[in-house]
Amino acid sequence: MSSLWSLRWLWVYLLIGQFAISNVRTAWPTSDSTNIQLLGIFGNGLNMNDSTPGTLWSRAMFNAAMLLSQQYNITIDGQFIGSQLVASGGITMNALSSSCLLISTSNIVGIVGPTFSRETQVIAPFAAQLSIPVVSYSATDPGLSDRGAYPTFYRTVPSDTTAALTIAQLFMKFNWTSSIIIYQNDAYGSDGAKVITDAFNNNNLTITQMIMFDIVTRTIRGDLKSLLLSSSIRNVILWAETDYASLILQEAIDCDVLGPQFIWILSSTVQLNSFSQEDNAKLIGILTIEPVVASAVNEPTNTTLLNAAYDIWQQYEPETFPGTENVNAYALFTFDATWLLIRSLEQLCSITNNLSSPCLSIVNDSFCFNRRLLDSSSLFDIINNNTFLGVSGLVQFTTSSADRVSGIYYIVKNIQSLSNELNYVPVLVWSSSDAWTPHSQQNTIIWPGQSLVVPTGYATIAGVILRIAVIEAPPFTMTQQVADANGIITTKLIGYIPDLLAILQTNMGFIPNITFLPANQSYDGLIDDVANNVYDIVAGDVTIIAARREKVSFTDSIYDNSLRIIVRNTASASPNFWFYLRPFSMGVRLCILGSIILSALLMYLFERKANETLRHRSIISGIVMSTWYPLGTIMGFGVDYTVRTGAGRFLTFSVFFLSLVLIATYQATLTSSLTLKQTQNIISGIDDIKNGKIPYGRIGILTNSSIEAYYLQEISNGIRNYYPLRTEGAIFTSLLSKVIDAAIMDEGVLEYETNSIYCNLTLVGTGFDPSAFGIVFQKNWVYEQVLDVNILTLRESGTFNDLKSKWFQANTCSQSSDTSTSSSIEVMTGLFVTFAVMCGLSLIFFIWLKLLPIRRRLLQTVLNLHYRVCPSARAPPDSPLDVQNPFDIRDI
C-alpha cells in the first residue's frame, strides 16, 4: 500500500513538473529535437517577467554555450547537443519531478545546476543513480564536496568551505575577533554557518551567537532587535540567499540595527533599489563577500569564448544583457559548467568513435529512475582530467573532490553612496596565494556611519553615560580640596582610580557619572549593587574572586595585588658589628676626632718649651705625645705627664669638660640602643599567624571583604574569631592604640600608608595570596569587550606601571625600619661650640704670655724716657722698681 501511495505522489509531482516545463517561454531557438541533451535547472521562472536578473543571466549563458557548441560544430554521433530547461522555483521536489519527467522522455546525458544546495542534495544522488554527471554553478554547500556521497557531482563555483576561510581572514585583517551569524534554515544556511564556525575556531576567532531565519515563515526566530542589542558584538555575518537577505535587511532597517551601530557582512548581493531612499544612510558601509571570476583579479580567462557567448546573448535576448561589466560571476560559472560537459562529451566520442555503434548508450525506460548511461566511467575520467581555460578562469577537477582546484577568487564589495545613489564598490580581492589585497581600482572602504576608521567590532561606548561607583581607599581613591580662580573650594577625586578613569574616558569617549562612596561601604554590597543594576561599573580595589564572579563580571587586572601583614614598628634585630659606634652619628664622630687633633696641636704649642717631656722631642714625636694627652683625658685613664703652663691647664679643663659630656651621652645612648635591641617583631609572616603566635582576637580583619574570605578559609576554618574592622582607616588607628597587634590588608594600600602617613607602622613577611583588582560590571554587559580591549591596551603600553609609580612609590618616611637612637651633630653642636670657645680662650692666654717680654722692654723704654725728662722721679735706691713684674707701675 505504501509503495502505491509513493507512486501516486510521484505522479502528482510529475504533473507539477510538466506544468513547470510547459511554462518555459524564451526567445532562444529550441534545441530539443536531438537525441543527446543537457538539462539546465534554474531556480526561478524562465520567463523574463518572473525571474531575477541572476537567474536570467545564468540561463542566458547556458543557452549561449549550447548554441556556441553548434557554431563550433561540436556533435555527438553526428548530432548537435540539445538542451532542456527546468524552473524549480527553489523547491526541491519541483526540481526532482521536472528532472524525472524530462529524463523519462529525453536522452539527458548531463545536468547543469541546480541553483540551490538544498535541491542539489536531492538531484546529485538522483543523477548518480542514472550515472550522469551534475555540474552546479551556484550550489556551495560544503557537504556536497564529499565524493563518496555524491560520486557524479561537480561544481564550478567555490565551496563554502573556502568562503568561510576568506571571511575568517577578513576578520583577522581588520583585527576583529568575534561575530554573530544570521543564517537561513536549510542546507546552504546551516552547513555554511557550521563551516564558518569551524574556520573561526581554527583561527582563534569566536562566533558568539547564531540567529536563524525560517525560510518557510520568512521571519527571524526571535526578536532581532533584542538579540543583537543584547550582545556586545557588532559584527553580523548574514548567510542567506539574495531573496532572504533582502527580507532580513528590511527587518534590520525597521529595528534600527544596521549602520552605524552594526557592521553587516553579506554572502550575496541584494538589489539596492528595493529599499527606500530614506534608509540609504543605514545601508552605507555594508560589505558583501562573493566568489568572482579570474578577470576580477587580473588573472587570465578565455576572452574568445566569452565574447562569442556575449554576442549570442545579445543576438537572442538583448533586453536582458546588462553590459559586459555587469554580468555576475554565477552566469560565467554557468557557462563553464555547461562547457565542461560539452567538451567532455566531445572528447569521449572522439576517443570511442566507432561507426558501428554510438559513443553514448542509454538504458531506456519509461520510469526515470530505471534509466542508465552505460559506460559512464569513461566520461567521468575525462571530466576528472579535463583542464581548460574557461570564461571564469582555469577549470580543473580531481577524482577526490567535487570542487574545482584552481580559478578560485573572491571579492569584497562595499555599499557606498555615489552621486546620491547606492552602489556596490569593489574594495578587496582574494586569491589562494595572496589572501585579501586591495582592489586595483578602488580600495577605500566607507564604514557604517560614513566613517573611514575601521570599527572595533564591539559595541561603541562613546557618548554613553556610565554610572560609576568608586570607594574611598587611599591611594586608589582619595579626595582633595581645590580652589578655583574665584576662590571657590571644591572637592576633587584623586588617586590611582580617578587617573585610570580619566584615561579610559579619553580613549573610549563615555560620559562618567561618578558616585563617591565612603570607606565604610561594604565591598560585597557593591557587588550586589552592580548585579542589581544600581551602577554600571565599580572601579576600585575590588578583588576578583570566584564567589563574586558568580554574580558579576570583571575586566582583566587593573592592579596585581597580594596580601601583607602590618604591625607596629620595632627595631631591627639584624646583627651589626659596629653597633657600639651607633650612640654617635657620623657627624659627631668626626667632630670628636677633630677635637682630639685640635687639642693635641694646641697642647704641643703650649707645652713644647715649658714641659720637660716635650722639650727634647722631635716635632712629630711631640705632636704624637700631645695627642696622647687629650685622648687619655677623654677616655678617663689619665696621662703620664703634667702640664706646666696656664694655657695648658685651661685646655685640660676644656678637654675634661668635653669628655664628661661625651661619656655621659655615650653611656645613655648605648643603653637605650641595647634595650631596643631586645625588642623584636612579634611575628615574621603569615605562618606565625596560622600557628597562633598572636591571639586571634588581636588580629584585625576588614569585614565583608575578600580578606575576610581568605581568613575564614585559610586560617580559622570558618570561625570568625578575629577583631572586626569596618574601614581601612580603622586598621591603622587600632594598631596605634594597641587594640590589635597585627592586621591583614592589601599590599598596595599598606605600602602607601606606611611609606607616606603611618611611619611608625611597618610590614612584616612577604606577600601572600596573590590576586588582582578588576573593574566590576554586569554579566553579559554589551560594552564588556570594548572595555576589556582598552584595559589590555593600557597594560601593554605600560600605563598601569606609570600609575603605580606615581601613587605607590612615593616615600616620605625613613627607609630604615630601625628606631634611631644615635646622637646627631645637631644635638651635640652646643658641646663642641663650647669646647671650641674654651680652646680659643686658652690660645689667647698663651699668646698673652708670649707677649710678656715685649711688654717688659716696652715698659723699660718708657721709664728711661721718663727719667731723662724728670730725674727727680727716679726711685730711691732702697726702693728699686721690680722690672720683672709687669704689673708694678708704681713709678708710672
Image (cartoon, rainbow, N blue to C red):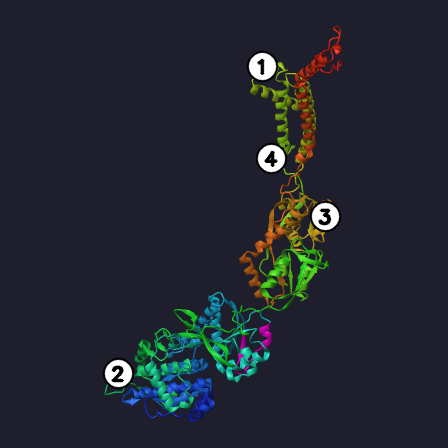
Residue 350 has which mark?
2
Where does the image place residue 493, in percent across and percent down from the top left?
Answer: 67, 58
Q: Is residue 2 above or below residue 193?
A: below
Badge 4 vs badge 2, beta-carbon distance below 8 Å: no
Residue 666 locus on image (x, y percent): 67, 29
**Is 161 included in the stretch rendered in magenta?**
no
Q: Is residue 26 left or right of residue 794?
A: left
Provide the residue designation for mark 3: 733
Q: Local crowd at mark 1 within 10 Å, few (<14), some, or many (≥20)?
A: few
* Residue type, mark 4 in image: Pro
Look at discs 1 and 3 and give the one toward the viewer. Answer: 1
Q: Nearer the viewer, mark 4 or mark 1?
A: 1
Circles 4 and 1: CB atoms closer than 8 Å = no
Element on which disc 3 rests:
helix
Task: Give the labeled residue for mark 1.
Answer: 616
Name which of mark 1 and mark 2 comes first in the sequence.
2
In the image: residue 887, left or right of residue 85 = right
Give the magenta-colored segment's residue range: 211-229
Which quadrant of the view contains residue 131? bottom left
Amino acid type of disc 3?
A: Thr
